[in-house]
Image (spheres, rainbow, N blue to C red):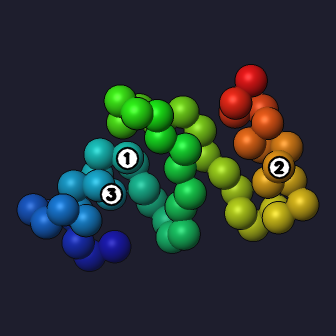
Amino acid sequence: MEDSGGTANGRVIADYGITAFPTTLLIDKEGKVVGQINLNNPDGVREQFDQLLN
């Protein structure tokens, strides 16, 4: 994650607190992070989405 400077990617990394790749965030229309999905557990992805959307 070298690019934490002035480029668009660096701003996104800093603004959303990304510390590892891949990072999957659920972002609302105002740009607020409302959840994070752990894709390392593919069997639980549906359950994670259901929890975030309720």
Q: Residue at x 50, y 66 (%)?
A: 20
Quadrant containing the C terminus is: top right
In the rendered structure, which amino acid carries the disc numbered 3?
A: Ile
Read off the residue under disc 2: 46
Please indicate whether residue 54 sits to the left or right of residue 44 in the image.
Answer: left
Q: Residue at x 40, y 33 (%)?
A: 29
The residue furthest front is 29
Residues at marks 2 and 3, CA–CA distance in whole angstroms = 26 Å
Question: Are the residues at dot 3 and dot 1 in contact (C-beta closer than 8 Å)?
Answer: yes
Quadrant containing the N terminus is: bottom left
| First reached walking from the N terminus: tag 1 or tag 2 | 1
Residues at marks 1 and 2, CA–CA distance in whole angstroms = 23 Å
| First reached walking from the N terminus: tag 2 or tag 3 | 3
Read off the residue under disc 3: 13
Read off the residue under disc 1: 16
The residue furthest top is 54
